[in-house]
Image (tube, helix red, strand yellow):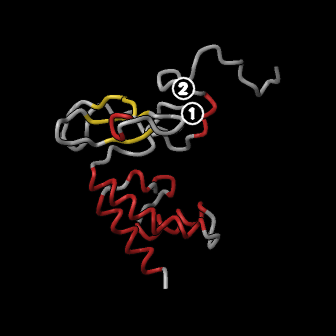
Amino acid sequence: MKPDQLPARTTPVTPWNPSRRATAKVKNPLPVPTTCRHCGAEVNLVSNAEIYGREYGEWPWTFMCQGPNCRAYVGLHPFTGIPMGTLATAPIRNARKAAKDLFNPLWQSGQMTRDEAYAWLAGELGIANVEHCHIGWFDVEQCNQVIRAVKARTP
């Protein structure tokens, strides 16, 4: 075995036993949510079938609020136990989708790199550290700021 290689895995990859390689690739890992920031209820790790009625994707795991009227949730980075963002209620999920739908073409079109697009966005939103500029971390108002900034930039 080469010095930079990890030993072969002997147990299956699960959120409780994540891939070390996948975990190392996550640049800014957020802590695992245990209490919902929206309603204060307990948060559990569940299959995304609880949201969609069947499992989707290679990594069908989600942190989900157990509050009866909340249903905030966030997916996990593939093959890790790390949330991809913060718990999001339906209005926040809708706002994030709208923000990404406008923002992503800035870098997907080749106008700029993804890193350049996020650096620009961080500047527009007054986020000093670009590493803290993630739409998956934003609330509704921050998503609205993304939308306004992109619309102002786009002719």
Q: State left or right for residue 100 relative to residue 93.
A: right
Q: Residue furthest right?
A: 2
Disc 1 versus disc 2: distance between alpha carbons? 7 Å
Up-down: is 62 above or below 13?
A: below
Up-down: is 9 above or below 45?
A: above
Q: Amino acid at mark 2?
A: Pro
Instruction: Give coordinates of residue 140: x percent, y percent.
Output: 29, 60
Q: Amino acid at mark 1?
A: Thr
Instruction: Give coordinates of residue 56: x percent, y percent.
Output: 46, 39
Q: Quadrant of residue 40?
A: top left
Question: Tag on residue 18?
Answer: 2
Q: Quadrant of residue 105?
A: bottom right
Q: State left or right for residue 111 relative to residue 38.
A: right
Quadrant in which the N terminus is drawn: top right
- The residue under the point 55% across, 32% down is 79
The kind of secondary structure element at disc 2 is loop
Q: Are marks 1 and 2 in contact (CB under 8 Å)?
A: yes
Q: Quadrant of residue 39?
A: top left
